[in-house]
Image: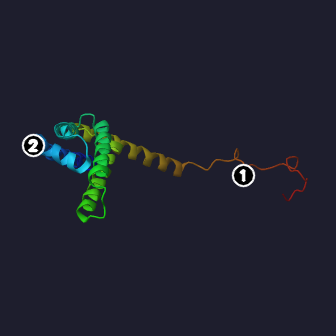
Amino acid sequence: MATLAAIIGRLCLAALFVLSGIPKLMDPAGTGQYIASTTGLSPSLGLPAGIFEVAAGVLLGAGIMTRLVAIILAGFVALVTVLFHAEITDQAQSIQAIKNLAIIGGLLMVFAYGQVSWRVSTWKERARRHDAEVAAARAEGRAEAIAPAPRGGGLFNRRRSVADRTDGDPRT
């Protein structure tokens, strides 16, 4: 179930970037004007920003180099937040900054857990391995419960002779 949730979450994040990159590709001049008016950066960044968002979103959605793409996208979103939504006294900008913070959190989760395979056979194999590990741990626990307690050999289980005692007192 966790694997399915990870895949759906990754697809949702990917869709966000693809769907926000397509308008930048459709109107690179308008995107460039917005970038120049808001940040003072070159208006020629509109088209590369759109290409980057679409390409990174497709890679993330397809599960190709997910860890690398996720960390690069997290850095991109952090940079965009600082450049475009730094004025947190404005309610609209504050909402956008908080939304971007949540996106960064999701991307960091993708980075932390890396690639999740699409194939159902991989899920079944992972479940079989997990079940085998649980069964082995239970068997080990039952064996420890049945086995007699070890005698001697331990620091506190050992009977000391009078010669081992430092003061020679038989009561210690």
Task: Estimate the x, y position of residue 104 in percent, counting from the top left.
Answer: 31, 50
Within 10 angstroms of label 1, few (less than 14), some, or many (20 or more) residues? few
Q: Which mark is residue 2?
A: none
- In depth, the one of 36 and 49 nearer the eye is 36
Query: Three-letter amino acid code at disc 2?
Result: Asp
Q: Are the two marked residues, 2 and 1, in contact with CB atoms closer than 8 angstroms? A: no
Give the SS element for disc 1: loop
- In depth, the one of 150 and 35 nearer the eye is 35
Q: Residue at x 29, y 41 (%)?
A: 70
Task: Estimate the x, y position of residue 9 in percent, counting from the top left.
Answer: 23, 49
Q: Which mark is residue 156?
A: 1
Q: Identify the image quadrant of residue 48.
A: top left
**Is there any visible trace of residue 72 in the rendered image?**
yes
Instruction: Tell me the residue that label 2 is attached to.
Output: 27
In this picture, is 101 found above or below 25? below
- In depth, the one of 46 and 63 nearer the eye is 46
Numbered label tally: 2
Task: Identify the colour scheme used.
Answer: rainbow
- Residues under labels 2 and 1: Cα distance? 78 Å
Camera-nearest label, 2 or 1: 2
